[in-house]
Image (tube, rainbow, N blue to C red):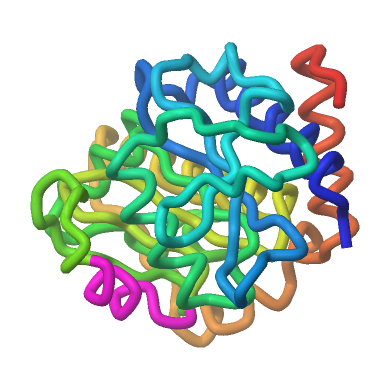
Amino acid sequence: MDTEAKLRKDLAACYRLFDWLGWTELIFNHITVRVPGAEGGKPAYLINPFGLHYAEVTPENLVCIDVDGSPRIDSPGNPGNTGQVNRAGFVIHSAIHSARADAHCIMHVHTTAGCAVASKESGLRHDNFYSAMLYDDLAYHDYEGVTTNLDEQPRLVKSLGSRNHLILRNHGLLVVGPDIPTAFNRLWVMQRACEIQLASDAGSGPNRAIPESILRTVPQTRVAGKGEVHRLIFDTMLRRAGIGT
């Protein structure tokens, strides 16, 4: 298991990678990762302090909070950190970290392609190379306004269920993973699937469907579905962006 210090370095690098990829939204949206050694049985996680752009996030200024939103002041990475956390980020991420023991990392974005597909009644179709990889692992959650009400948490958790990719209708994209590299690759694939769907819909003629018999086999054939490959991809992208960890 990675130490909190290692997780802080990887998470801060991931925030800067999102900035390099253009997956930012002013000072909003969040990437969180669960930290080891949570007290009292409550999961604790690292999140960006509200008011900073992704490019400004560092290992030192990440905030460690528990699922009740209380700062974990005993965090060894940044003792006494009581930085402000965005309400919507707390509501979404605390709900999922509490409900899914396997959701060590959660990523939520408002990319143009993701928001556009989230606004379509049909959602994301499984008819392109990347969307086929998400077959039977994609869920939807209906829009209830800005996600700041605690009473939405159980419905959000129910919508996600045991799946790893979630389209927040009329809103954006969310993925969960056992670690930062896996969640990153899942989001990258989901983002590409949305981009390609928008591009194919702009072309003339009908889209060609993929038979369900084929779709059922696609997720198991993914080379990038293995943990060590996720790490290779993540590290490669950090090098490409000139980001050290």
Q: Is residue 168 left or right of residue 111?
A: left
Give the residue drawn at x 66%, y 49%: 185
Look at the picture and state if 200 lies above or below 216: above
Q: Does residue 57 belong to the magenta stretch?
A: no
Name the image quarter holding residue 115: top left
Residue 188, horizontal then vertical, whole percent: 58, 43
* Quarter of the figure with residue 178: bottom right
* Residue 160: in magenta span: yes
Residue ID at (74%, 48%): 181
On the image, the x and y values in percent for residue 130 come to 54, 54
Nearest the eye: 243 or 64? 64
Quadrant in which the C terminus appears: top right
| Residue at horizontal 22 percent and vertical 44 percent from the top | 171
- Residue extending furthest bottom? 213
Predominant SS along the magenta part: helix
Query: In the image, which residues are magenta?
Result: 153-162
Vertical side of 63 occupied by 32: above or below: below
Is 222 left, or right, of 236 in this rendering? left
Q: Residue, x 36% and y 16% (percent of image)?
A: 26
Residue 61: percent from the left, percent from the top?
Answer: 63, 24
Tell me residue 19's x, y (percent).
56, 18
How many numbered circles are shown? 0
